[in-house]
Amino acid sequence: MIRSIAVDPLNPLRVYAAGPAGVFRSEDAGLTWEAANNGLAGEPLAITLDPITSQTVIVLLSDGSVWKSVDGATTWQALDAGA
């Protein structure tokens, strides 16, 4: 099941999907996918990209926490409540 999809506005071949199985990334417009969960702790509900710096990916997890990746979902860091 996929809960959320985000397409890179600067590179439409790069697509991200989030769901109970985690975050996945495609570099070929969805033909193939790879897991992009390294360091992500929890079940993703929603995913979005920074429209200017599309390597910055933000994910909302089911526990209400927000995680950020600045390297195209290769690694993740939890954000503080006010960040």
Image (cartoon, grey):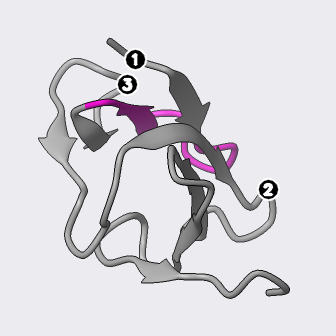
Question: For this view, does 21 lie left or right of residue 76?
Answer: left
Residue 77, how many percent across, how many down?
Answer: 45, 83
Element under label 3?
loop
Question: What residue type is disc 2 on?
Answer: Pro
Question: What residue type is disc 1 on?
Answer: Ile
Mark closest to the chain's N terminus, 2 or 3: 3
| Circle 2 crowding by C-alpha within 10 Å: few under 14, some 14–19, many from 20 | few
Q: Nearer the viewer, residue 29 or 17?
A: 17
Residue 41, how many percent across, how many down?
Answer: 30, 65
Q: Nearer the viewer, mark 1 or mark 2?
A: 1
Q: Nearer the viewer, residue 50 or 45?
A: 45
Q: Magenta residues: mostly which secondary structure?
A: loop
Cα–Cα span, label 2 and label 3: 18 Å
Question: For this view, does 14 lie left or right of residue 28?
Answer: right
Cα–Cα span, label 3 and label 1: 16 Å
Do the numbered discs 1 and 2 sit on residues whose CB atoms are within 8 Å? no
Question: For this view, does 51 lie left or right of residue 34?
Answer: right
Magenta-drawn segment: 8-20
Do the numbered discs 3 and 1 sit on residues whose CB atoms are within 8 Å? no
Residue 22, how many percent across, how many down?
Answer: 28, 42
For the point 36% across and 44% down, the residue is 43
| Residue 60 visible at all | yes
Residue at mark 3: 29
- Queried whether the magenta region covers residue 11, the answer comes back as yes
| Circle 3 crowding by C-alpha within 10 Å: few under 14, some 14–19, many from 20 | some
Quadrant including the N terminus: top left
Question: What residue type is disc 3 on?
Answer: Ala
The answer to whether 36 is drawn above or below residue 32 in the figure is below
Residue at mark 2: 51
Residue at mark 1: 2
Element under label 2?
loop
Element under label 1?
loop
